[in-house]
Every structure is written in structure tokens, then in C-alpha cells.
Image (cartoon, rainbow, N blue to C red):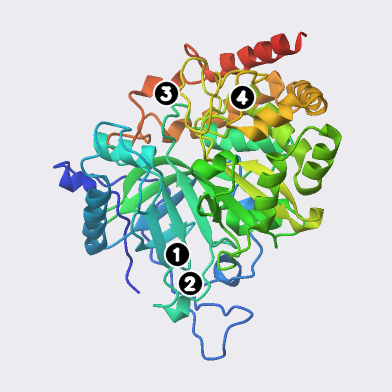
Amino acid sequence: MDARPLLLASLLLAMGCTVTPAVDDDDDDTEAPAVPGEACADDDEDLVRPDGWGAESHCQGADANYDLLFDDTVVRRIDITMTAANYEAGLDDREDLLGGGGGPGGGGDLDTEPMWVPVTIALDGVQWWEVGMRYKGNSSLRSAYNSGVLKVPFRLNFDKYEDDYPDLANQRFHGFKKMTFSSGFKDDSLIRDKLGADLFRAAGIPAARGSFVRVYLDHGAGPVYMGLYTMIEDPSNKMLDSQFDDDGGNLYKPDGDGAALTTFVEGDMHKKTFEEEADFSDVQALIDVLNGDRSDAEAWRTDLEAIFDVGGFLRLLAVNQTLVNWDSYGWMTHNYYLYADPSDDGRIVWFPWDLNECLLIPGGIPGGPGGGGSSDDPESVLLEGTGDGWPMIRYLLDDPIYAAEYRDQLANVLAGPLAVDSVTALMSDYHVLIEPYVVGDDGEAAPYTNLASDSSFTGALDGNQGLLAHIEDRHDAVNDALGL
């Protein structure tokens, strides 16, 4: 089975740059003897797994190894390889999708997903073969293409090509089928994706787990350092099993005008579980009740709470507004999931996604609010100016019972999971952990970085308008809004 390197790196060659193999002290050139592949519990007798296949590391049904992959105290190395032919195909695909897109960040959402290609993945001396990889993102991908940055977000699917390679059927990555990799676009600190999700979970809100990884790429000229990424679990995979009591419900990733929830638009309610079943009755009922008659407020609340975790949403909103997570509902019609939790009588739970632009420094919101109705400043704590185009915010906060609960949630998150001391300590710990892999001799280098300079990273916490001051300023803003 041949090793197949990733699409990204050879863009250096296309740009006329020299590819310099990275040096890593962890490398060991000693060739270890082949280890016969272990069988999975449900394998047919005649199925022979490739050498190096392990029951715990590769088999479907193995426990998801969160302790290994999402260890907050280490930065693991992941190596990706691909063939030159697949690299060339990827270049052509990128050109077809993004060519002529204007300046950095210009253009709208992609109408077509980038192509998948097979790659080989290596972690801690273990390999995974014929793994599907594709680029992800919209503005992040387009901006990187237009500016010549080669550090871009991507996805991995570990059994994408199982039909072509039966010996790899149901291949898993320490229990996981899918992983996403965030490039830290618009985040000089490179910690927002992970930190934001950690803070949401600390407040009792489901959010995908992430870890810092250094990614290396080899397309035939030796490994090249692609930079420091945040590896994030796919919410449609093990997250439902690990953070809910029952993973058998409908999971939706709303995106588009229908994600504003003013009316039901089936095509904008993208199903991530049970995709083949055209049953949208749960989310349609939520939208109908939300936008229904509110003249009898008590009856409306009763009907809404029967199908939606209102308290969880108000808690999420409190965290969202305290941190300033602008690229989310209320300003943009994307970046959240809805899960109909069978263990809670099918009530829908709302949780966040794509947090690289949370903890946004005041005044730093690029572009302005998105569609879906009128909106006030995303830094607003009490959201007085948010219009009816965002009914899940406006209608809840227009109700005096829910408005009071929201204020209580703001006070609670300030005193608990978003307390200044605990948040700033976590920021500092993560910054120190990743610094050797961002700046310095082993750090990122153009074109595999989104940083304008090393000082962009080193000053991201305590520099002018740094994150440490930001969290203190947000505490002041919330206390002022609450009259405390």
C-alpha cells in the first residue's frame, strides 16, 4: 500500500519556492520490524488486516481515546503524505473552485466542496492508510488561496476509501472516524478554537473537544512543517456518545437563510446523522413553536420548553456575549448545531461550532453583521438591538421570565466558568504550551503561517488589546449591563 501525501505543500513548488525538509528531534530513522495486523472483533475470517493495524488504534468499536488525542498538556506531531499526482489534482481543483475570487477574504461561500484525496497519516509511529482528506472552510480557504498562505484548514475521513481497499474496512483513528483541523485563521493567539470550546463545556454546554497538534506534510520532497493546528473532533462522530446519554438523535448543522430560524427551510437544515431519512419534524416543530403566537406567554413557554432546552440556550448565549463570539447566530447564519436528544424526550439542544473568532477584541469585528435581520453590536451584552430576524434571541429576551433567567446566567458564568483568574490562567498555559511550535527555530514560517510576524503571536495575550485585558474588559461590560 503506497504512502500518499497531502495536497497542500507542493504549492511551494507551484509558487517557485524551495521546499526545505523540516528537522524534528523526535524522528528515528531506525526501521522497526513489521507488526502483523490485528483482527477486529467483527472481521470475516478471510479478512487480513495490513501490518501495523491495531485493534485499539484502527478498529471500529474501539473506545474513542480522548486521553491520547485530546491531552491538554502535550502538542503531538501528525505526519501526512500524498502522491505527486494527487497533489497536482488538488492544485487543479483549488484553481477551479477559487480562481478569480478577488482579494484576500473576498467571494462568497463555495458552491462545491473541495475534492477528496487519499493520504497516509502517521502518529506516534503508527500509520493509517488511504485516509480521505479535503480542504474545508469558506473565507479562510479563499483568503489563503488569494494571499498565497498554505496553512489552510482541512478534514480527515479515515474510512473514505474502504470500498476500494477492503482490508481497511471501517478504519478508525483511535476510535474516531473523522477529524477536522483548524488553521487559526484570524487568530494570532492560535488558542481561540480550543479555549472557546473548553470554556463553553466548563459552563455545561456541549462543545467539540480539541487539541493542539503540529502537522507535517510530505509530497515526495521530505516533510515540511505546515504549522500549529487545532485538531477538533467532528460533532457527528463520537461527541454525541461522549457528551450525551444517547447518541441516536437527529443532528443538524443549519447553514443559510433558514439558519436564522424565522421559517423552516429544509435545504438549510443539513442533517449530520440519519442523512438518508427525510424526517425533519423535530426541528420544524421547534421553528413553528418559536415563531408561533406569543400572546399567551405562559402557554408559549410551555410549548417551547417541551421541545427545546431553553435554559441551555440562555446559558450558551451568556457565554457567547461575555466572550464576544461574533461569528455565530445573531450575526451570521451558521456555526451552530442542533441535536434532538433522545435521552431528554427528544428536546433539541443547541451547541456552538467554529470558534476561531470568539474572544474578539472590541472594535475588531471584520465586515459587520451578516444576514437574517437587524442586529446591534455583537459586543452588546443584553442584545437590545437584535431584531426579529433572529427570533431565538429576540423572542426569548422579550419574555420577562427568560430575560431574567438570561441575566442570572450572565452573573453565574462570570462567577464560575468565566472567572478572570481561571480563564487567564488557561490562556497563559496554552500560550506557553504552543509557543515553541509557533515562533522560534521550530516555529511556523511563511507560507505556512497566518501570522504577520512573531510579535503577532507573542503579544496576543498581553500586548495592546490582548486577550488577557479582553476578558477583564468583558467582565466590566457584563457587570455594567447588570448594574453590578
Q: Residue 167 at what x, y percent from top left?
A: 46, 80
Please tell me the numbered disc located at residue 323.
4
Please rate how many residues cluster around mark 1, counting C-alpha atoms within 10 Å: few if below 14, some from 14 to 19, many from 20: some
Mark 4 vs mark 2, CA separation in Å: 44 Å
Image quarter (top left, top right, bottom left or bottom right) of the C terminus: top right
Is 140 or 180 nearer to us in this picture? 140
The reply to whether callout 4 and callout 2 are in contact (CB within 8 Å) is no
Mark 1 vs mark 2, CA separation in Å: 7 Å
Nearer to us: label 1 or label 3: 3
User: Can I make out residue 333 in this image?
Assistant: yes
Q: Which residue is mark 1?
A: 127
Q: Residue 246 at what x, y percent from top left?
A: 75, 59
Nearer to us: label 4 or label 2: 4
Give left or right: position of 285 versus 3.
right
Residue type for callout 2: Gly
Q: Which residue is mark 3?
A: 366
Residue type for callout 3: Pro
Mark 1 vs mark 3, CA separation in Å: 41 Å
Q: Where is residue 101, by image quadrant?
A: top left
Q: Which residue is mark 2?
A: 52
Is 344 or 412 nearer to us in this picture? 344
Please rate how many residues cluster around mark 4, counting C-alpha atoms within 10 Å: few if below 14, some from 14 to 19, many from 20: many
Give left or right: position of 79 versus 325.
left
The secondary structure type at the circle numbered 2 is: loop
Mark 3 vs mark 4, CA separation in Å: 16 Å
